[in-house]
Image (cartoon, helix red, strand yellow):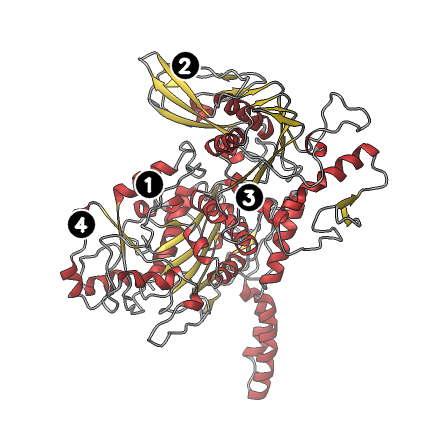
Amino acid sequence: MQRLYLRENSNSCYHRVFLPPDDRLLMLPTSKTNNCPTTTAKLTPFIKPLCSLNQPAKYLATLSTLALFASAMLTPLYAQAALPEAIQAALSRANLSATDISIVITPVGDKNASRLPAPIQVINSPKQGISNSHIDSQPKSLSVDNVSADPDSIKRQATQNNKAKEVTVHQSPLVTIEKQTIKQHEKQLHAYTDDPYTYQSLESSPSLLPNDGQSTSSVPNKNNPDKNSANKSSKGNASNATTNNATIKISFSPLLSHQADIARTPASTMKLVPSFIALDTLGADFVWHTRVYHTGIIIGDKLYGDLIIQGSGDPKMTHERLQQLLYKIQTAGIRHINGDIIVDSAIFKNVSKDPAAFDNSPLRPYNASPDGFLVNFSSIGIQSYPLDNTRAQLTYTPQLANYQLPSMINIRSAACGQARYSLAPHWQPTQLTLNANLPDSCGEHAFYVAYPDAKDFAARVIASKWQTLGNTLTGKVISQEKPYLSNKNVKEAKSPRGLAAIAISPLPIVSYPSLNLTQQIYDINHFSNNVMTEQVALSIGAYDNAGINRNGINKAGSDKVNTDKAGVKKVDVNQESTDKDKVIHQQATSLYQFGQPPATDYSQALQAINHWWQTKLTSPPPHLTNGSGLCRDCTISAENLSELLTYAYEQPSFDAYVSSLGIAGVSGTISAHSERLPESQAIGRAWIKTGTLNHVTSMAGYVKGLSGQDYVVVGLINSDQALNAYTARPVLDAMLDWTAQH
């Protein structure tokens, strides 16, 4: 149990400052002032009588009274447990105070049944591999960072900031990875290279680790010659982990708790909330199905009618996967369409947002809006190829139909930066204009720019891909939330088009599954993809199988669903609805028998998340306005986030969850940990989600201590002094290092 110390100077006092609920909640010390009454001054009237007492009975009675008054006056004063020396020193270097940070570090599981993956050792080259003869001579396992060190040096490293506590280094298998391998892996995965916290990944993401979790240079467990069995406990559920030795039960009291109950802005560590809730409710193998229907008839390879693409909310419909979907339509027998391609994105409603609202950066991919049929994150890649000293060629991925994109650009002398500075792009109704010449330092460089309208972007990409496959389309690509009717040939709803024109109980000609949820969560937490997180959060509300009754609203949506004698579902619409609306709703309902839910908005999705939290956990749910953490009014306490991570540790979906996190000093948004703190014991031993906004820096996840104990770790920094990640992130690096030493 941590001891609390109260200290007050003669010219200062400390107290809590709470901002309104819709703003960030911070704990700040007041500035020093002579007008602040000291504790001594407050207690003077009670101290004087005490000093004149001679009788013990009166003395004790007065002392008791004094204690009550003192307690009442001391309660508002700022009190906290002393932080570890390493963390306090890092705060000082960052010009931050202990009031700016909340920390919770809690042991989980037991030492003989760890659920975390094997630690990772990063080496420069194969020549720095591990000598088995050297390992055999070691009585203890090796440190992550120094495999050739003797046991005494390992112990010294483990206790450099925790001298009062002896740490026994736990023997566990190590996985060795070359730095070059990491760099190549990250290069293949990263696409949003002009933004350090938002990435797009390729469809086929190569795994950093071998399938069996071991490399050829892995350190075997001396007590278990089967190297593959060393990871069984980390790969399987905790309930399935067995050992011949007696398990070492640990106390779930926090190792360190500092201002744990203060609600703070978490930035992208908030992604940990919807990503795990999705795994827990939908399942790690959950997939989104994009289904394709058609009206009219097919003669030969020509469709006389409309093609309808029914969006499912798939977070990762990249342009490559979209082309695969269209190719499947082609192989189903349709190459020429005498009609329109209608994109039904009605599964999400009213989710579009102003891309400039958050930080006035509408071109940044992290500000893209979610959509029921989101294509390539609503972002386009611009690749530059210098031809000479004066000009460069530009290529675009994906291509946009019926939209002019400049193919050449002049070169100027300047430093290369983000697209908005280097190219100054501007999306006009029919063309893209670049208002700045390409900086000569960019060379061959990829810029990623968000398109302002997700539905228009999807329509133009579909039209371009359809033509690229050699197919034809006489009409247009129409993308809207309710694409059931066309402005032409509509007469009092007697000629519905799109989904409303499909007969009852249609079968899709194509059902295209997404990547499973585990793969999607990897991108979300590893590379902090905002719009993918929004898609998943909205999908929780849409696909929640719990049948939550929200304010009397049926799981099927805001309309009550009835069944007639034939067993056909019908919609009981509002009596004030027009006959046209009745036709549309009744006929469109037939599609949902295939598992497609009705429209879901943010309020329904956030309500589903809150319901899960209140059902599974004991603490109050976080305050969310979206699922990604790209918000200033979103708040959560370190204590609450720690409870979520602790709960997740014991669940069947934990393996998918922890594998989605970045590895300190190895991969993801925490890969630079080893550059900031080269001697950190957390390198290769911490699985972390980071969060970064101006004035906000956070880390949360899991750490495997040198003792073999697993820990949940949460650190949240909110301060005007933490202008960016480079200021405050070393403080949280020190927190990871300190935890790993235990």
- In the rendered structure, which disc, 3 or 4, sits on the residue that comes first in sequence? 4
Q: Amino acid at mark 4?
A: Gln
Residue 724: x and y in percent read: 44, 41
**Quick one: which residue is furthest to the right in this view?**
575
How would you rate the neighbour count of disc 2 (Cα within 10 Å): few for under 14, some for 14-19, many for 20 or more?
some
For disc 3, the neighbor class at 10 Å (few under 14, some 14 to 19, many from 20) is: many
In the rendered image of this protein, does residue 30 appear above or below residue 589? Answer: below
Q: Residue at x 41, y 37 (%)?
A: 202
Viewer-side residue, 379 vs 640: 379
Looking at the rendered structure, the kind of residue marked 2 is Ile
Report helix, strand or loop for mark 4: helix
Q: Quadrant of the C terminus?
A: bottom left
Mark 2 highlights which residue? 409
Q: Which residue is mark 4?
A: 128
Residue under pointer 1 = 185
Image mark for residue 288: 3
Residue drawn 80% across the image and 42% down it: 573
Residue type highlighted by circle 3: Trp
